[in-house]
Amino acid sequence: MSSRRDFIKTSVAVAAGLSLAPAGLDARSGRNSRGKCREGGSADIIIAGGGPAGIAAAVTAARMGRKVRLFEMHGALGGMWTNALMTCLIDFGKGDIAKEISRRLEELGARVPRRGRMLESNYIFEPEYMKYVCEQMCVEAGVEFLLHCRVVDVEMDASGRRIKAVYTESKSGRQRWTAKAYIDATGDGDLCERAGCGFDFGGENPGDNDQPATMMAIVKVDDDTKIADCIANDPVSFGGKDKTDFYAGKARLKAVAQKAGYDATYTFLTRLHKNLLSLSVTHEFGLPVDDVEAITKATVRSRQEIFKFTQALARNGGDGWESLRVVATAEQIGHRAARRVHGKYTITNHDIETGARFEDAVATSNFGVDVHATTKDIKGFSQPHRQKSKPFQIPFRSCESADVDNLYMIGRCISGGFYPMSSYRVTGTAVEMGENVGRIISERI
Ligand SMILES: Cc1cc2nc3c(=O)[nH]c(=O)nc-3n(C[C@H](O)[C@H](O)[C@H](O)COP(=O)(O)OP(=O)(O)OC[C@H]3O[C@@H](n4cnc5c(N)ncnc54)[C@H](O)[C@@H]3O)c2cc1C
């Protein structure tokens, strides 16, 4: 657990480190000069992070007439859906935004069921189409978003309990932005950390790893019917039944890879479109969210694993595998873990075991607790201990920062324990809470 930073120290340091450029600063000479900062502008709501939760909140608030600014550090909206090539929607379809995303993907012919008939709540989509859908929804709603723009710091007011401004870094240099309310939708909880909020990170017990990270890829073959038994969402793989044994396809793929001479830490293949497949082959254990050196090394290692794995299969996998090619690897390694920022309420193991209900509920998590192997020693893909859970609700209070009054969290970084997060982290729940938290804040400001 991290200790809460000293707010006053933060705001003094920020103020000392930056000299705000005078009005009328010449953009060419002033914008990128060292130590200078330009006023960006004001808004009703600032959202850090354009992933599933951030987009849902931004579109909802903008449609309610609020001026919304959203900052995304990558070159596309969609978060894990696009930048991490995480192509599977789980516990989806709750709320208007999720239904609209599904409808738009359907119109583009860019989704297929994950299993059986569960097309509304569980499906596989093509990430390039998701990029397009997310951008179009934000543009049409009037969200003012910037890509390639990272939130890097905050300025606190004298009380230390309110954010006065956030700072971004981009090709435009350092900019200062103000709003009435701030939402952390960075997945990792970056904005809350900069604001000095307390948070937890790691597994259930002190010193335990959090969930592993995985780099995903898109691959293609000439004829995917030849390898259908390894494609988890192909009826051949799960025997055509509604209740898929997703693990069967995973295990068969692992066995084929082992026969081909490659023992991967994780194997998972789904069909996006004919002959176009989504692939996971890595588990990076104990990866922190705040260590760029470790993240870089894990990224390089994971990408290497994808190429070694696909080359081994293409060489020695047998019929159907010889044409296997890598089409894309993710720009961002996918982090299942997150800073679990302290909120006014923290979702507990008891809540998920009993299926807790709350008067201020903003989402319901129907997905069971899913903990991937947290260390290399664990045999198989998942942690052997199965934490029991029933569908449980997420209260608005777990999205309100305990430490900063005008700061909210949505998505992976809300306030909850390790096991609750292993359920509510899926994107259906991130979108539902983004939509409802965006609406509530818009009504209040
Ligand atoms: C490998 C893997 C497999 C998964 N499988 C599934 C699955 O099958 N189904 C499912 O539904 N969920 C799955 N998940 C979980 C799910 O993808 C995430 O928990 C979910 O994306 C969380 O949504 P979010 O909006 O909170 O965060 P994210 O999707 O992480 O989005 C956060 C956004 O904020 C941006 N950002 C971060 N820091 C900053 C900053 N400082 N300034 C500006 N922008 C910033 C990021 O670039 C990103 O776009 C998986 C996750 C991983 C990693």
Image: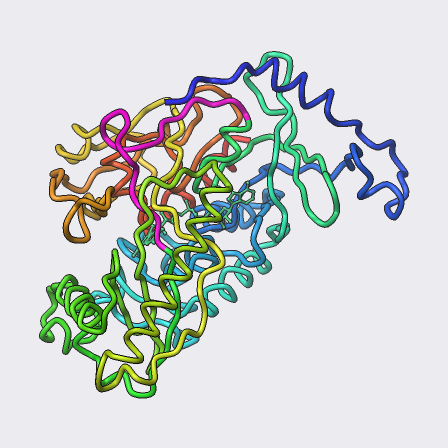
Asked if 123 appears above or below 311 in the picture, the reply is above
Residue 316: give x, y in percent of width and height. Answer: 25, 79
Asked if 231 appears above or below 19 in the picture, the reply is below
Q: Quadrant of the N terminus?
A: top left
Residue 290: give x, y in percent of width and height. Answer: 47, 36
Is 152 contained in the magenta span?
Answer: no
**Residue 11 or 144: which is nearer the viewer?**
11
**Residue 100 or 144: which is nearer the viewer?**
144
**What residue is shown at x 55% (from left), y 56% (from top)?**
138
Q: Quadrant of residue 92?
A: bottom left
**Residue 317 or 348: which is nearer the viewer?**
317
Q: Quadrant of the C terminus?
A: top right
Residue 235: give x, y in percent of width and height. Answer: 16, 76
Magenta highlight: main SS: loop
Is 196 contained in the magenta span?
Answer: yes
Asked if 428 appears above or below 314 in the picture, the reply is above
Count the numbered circles shown: 0
Q: Which range of residues does the magenta coloring cover? A: 195-214
**What residue is shown at x 33% (from left), y 87% (from top)?**
222
Q: Is residue 93 visible?
A: no
Q: Quadrant of residue 76?
A: bottom right
